[in-house]
Amino acid sequence: MRRTVRGTGIALACALFLCQPIAADHIKPGFNLFSVEQDIEIGRQSEAEAERQLPLLRDSFTERYMNDVVSNLARNVPGARYPYHVRVINANEINAMSLPGGPLYVNRGTIQAARTEAELAGVVAHEMAHVALRHGTHQASKAYIAEAGIGILGGLIGGRAGGGGNAGQIIQAVGGLGLNAVFLKHSRDDEYQADAVGAEIMAASGYNPIAMADFFATLRAQQKSEPGKLSQFFSDHPLAADREARIRKQATTLRLAQGRETGQFPQVRQALGSLPAQSSQRTVYRQQQQGQQGQQGQRGGYGNTTARGQVRIEPPSSRYARFDQREGFFSIDYPDNWQPYMPSRGVGVTFVPPGGMIDGGNGQEVILNGVIINHYDPFEVSGYRGNISLSQATDDVARTITQANSYLRAGVKRRETIDQAPGFSVNFSGTSPVTGQDERVTLITRQLSDGHVLYAVLITPGSAANAMGPVFQRMVRSLNVDDQAAHRTPTTN
């Protein structure tokens, strides 16, 4: 009987549910533990939580106008068809934000700071790009991998249809629903991506992307004269010095589609100017962040485990069985007393011996001994542009392992030949926070014809490393990959 494993000790979720490029082929949003449907549900629930705290502007004319702008842009947003919609926050600070699955928020001060509808559309398109690129749940996935474990490597967390229980568990682990800072704070690369895709959305919708760059110029000018109005913006949107220049350069390469503005921007701006001022929303953010810190302080962790000193793992059988991946992507031999675990979708498989998994005490099953095989589409290398070498991809995998598992130290990367194709191997070692004992991890990567990577990971207690080495070598030698099947295999959740 096949069982689903929920989590464990090394977090390399970058190979988990692999997201394909959403916009131009140089943009890759990164790994994600959630499905598109889960993004929408998380957004719906977070929106309800957030709007209990946010000082929303109750003005139907302004809200109708803003949603007309959103509808104009939404026709040209790449990727999944999210239910985009916007609410206006009655706050004078210049800021905007988005939640997974489609909810958008624009401060009243942002509308008043824009000089044209195109500038305002640039702000909205940027936030819609964050949604399309799934940056909110991407960041939540990254936050979660530090708390989950090696089971993630095999794609064993969220692959089931629906998967709502798992999604809820992950969201609670990283701060909960609502104005979760995980959803709102983006990396510099996320901002570059949202700028690039937002500019493409604008051009396709008939708005000149130069207006997005012009608004950045407006922000720089206002930062000098009214820094308080921009404090929250710069907290949520790190403004790299070259973002404006990047957008202006990109704008010269984009074809501007025919389009028509709503024509109501001057009236909306004038109407907002006549409304009473609203106090700062910074208190709302501060309260939300304090609540999230409280939740984080209550989380379990590997330090709570009762597994120390109780590890009894059955030795590997000398007889081997053959595992054939269901779409014909690869086949591999494994000891016949080990159990293969697979998600309902994706290509990953995890082989674990009896006793090779324990309860980590944090709601996760921890793999102490086993082998994981999965597929990886490199994305966090070289600014998302151009071809990525196998060496770079291997470094990316290894770096993710050590960043998410600070107790592990990587050894020297060595060239290998895996199933008649170029490959690399990297060894890791450290003291497991689960068992308090020496742990050894070996990573093997094999290049695929499309530039992606198939990887294998061995996890073993240090005391069993000498015995497990030949087993892992036997498994790797038996690996047979069908590169053509890799293109036919679904890798997303």
Image (tube, grey):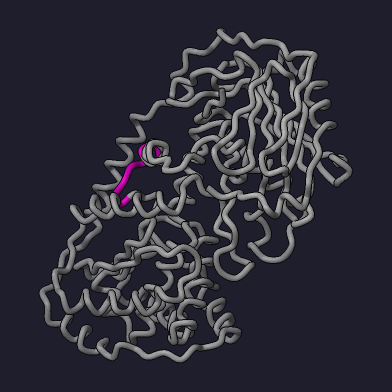
Q: In the picture provided, is 312 more to the left or to the right than 391? A: left
Q: Nearer the viewer, residue 111 or 373?
A: 373
Q: Quadrant of the N terminus?
A: top right
Q: In the picture provided, is 270 more to the left or to the right than 456? A: left
The residue under the point 50% across, 57% down is: 187
Q: Is residue 220 visible?
A: no
Q: Position of residue 27 (x, y in %)?
A: 59, 65
Q: Is residue 362 above or below residue 452?
A: above
Q: Nearer the viewer, residue 125 or 484?
A: 484
The residue under the point 49% across, 45% down is: 33
Q: Quadrant of residue 166?
A: top left
Q: Is residue 20 magenta?
A: no
Q: Quadrant of residue 441?
A: top right
Q: Quadrant of residue 433?
A: top right
- The secondary structure that most of the magenta stretch takes on is loop
Q: In the picture provided, is 81 more to the left or to the right than 389? A: left
The residue under the point 50% across, 69% down is: 78
Tag count in the figure? Answer: 0
Q: Position of residue 477 (x, y in %)?
A: 85, 31
Q: Is residue 319 visible?
A: yes
Q: Which residues are magenta?
A: 172-179
The residue under the point 79% across, 37% down is: 425
Q: Position of residue 317 (x, y in %)?
A: 75, 13
